Amino acid sequence: MGTLQQHSEKAGSDERERPLMRSSHVVSRHPMSPPFPEGMQMATLGMGCFWGAERKLWQLSGVFSTQAGSSGGFTPNPTYKEVRTGKTGHAEVVRIVFDPQIISHKDLLKIFWESRDLTHGMRHNSNIGTQYHSAIYAFRPEQRESALRSKAVYEQVLARKLLGPITTEIQQAGTFYYAEDYHQQYLHKIPDGYCGLQGIGIACPIANGDDP
């Protein structure tokens, strides 16, 4: 994971973004690129293949917009084909624009922890490569602190089930690179397409406003 951290630092110095062909979200019709409405916050989560992750996230009340892309690596403005080689250092991610008055970052973290096996390192189900590692990229210090606290708590829960450790990367958000338009809201366009998003059936105890 140390190598990925170095890659993330390199990527953060490059502010170019892949041009987005579509200006609005296919499902919500909301914008997919800044500026977003005042009061909105952002989160970036790497949950494995971004097709299923994006669908799960856009369905949540309080989520304004979602975008599939890559982040955390060192190759600037990568294509999806390049990310799939596993040589860019990037993770497949979903950037979420959300209304914190309706859904909190803590709510998003709970969904993140419960939606895939987070002990698999560079693997998501049968998919293997750096692009499939789990990641939380924080936009605010409190997001990073909350992610680290909830990780520690959930790791204890998993340890009692003889599972773990959690291999999720938690770092400050760097540059987000949009995936090609074909991948945006993919499972809305192709409902029977591959998803692969599946948790391990163990709840993360950070609900109802309680501290992790």
Image (cartoon, rainbow, N blue to C red):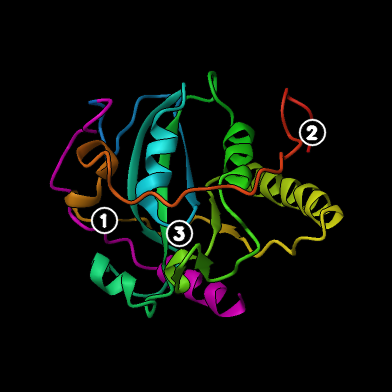
Residue at position x 37%, y 60% from top?
Answer: 70
The amino acid type found where label 3 is placed reads Gly
Question: Which residue occupies the extreme front position in the image?
Answer: 192
The C terminus sits in image quarter? top right
Residue 172 in the image, given as x and y percentages of width and height: 55, 57
**Front in this rendered view, residue 110 or 97:** 110
- Residue 18 on the magenta span: yes
How far is the residue under mark 1 from the one under mark 2?
34 Å
Q: Which residues are magenta?
A: 1-28
Q: Main secondary structure of the magenta part?
A: loop
Q: Position of residue 169 (x, y in %)?
A: 60, 63
- Residue at image position (32%, 61%) is 15
Gap between marks 1 and 3 measured at Cα: 16 Å
Q: CB under 8 Å between callouts 2 and 3?
A: no
Image side of residue 25 versus residue 109, left or right: left
Mark 1 vs 3, N-terminal side: 3
Q: Which mark is residue 174?
A: 3
Apparent side of residue 115 relative to residue 60 in the rendered image (left or right)? right
- Labels 1 & 3 near each other (Cβ < 8 A): no
For numbered disc 3, what is the local secondary structure? loop
Residue sitting nearer the eye, 165 or 17? 165
Give the numbered dot on residue 162: none
Q: Earlier in the sequence, mark 2 or mark 3?
A: 3
Indicate which disc residue 179 carries: 1
Looking at the image, which is closer to me, 193 or 89?
193
| Res 201 → quadrant | top right
Q: Name the residue at 26% across, 58% down.
A: 17
Task: Give the structural element (helix, strand or loop) at label 2.
Answer: loop
Q: Is residue 198 magenta?
A: no
Residue 155: image quadrant is: bottom right
Q: Amino acid at mark 1?
A: Ala
Numbered marks: total = 3
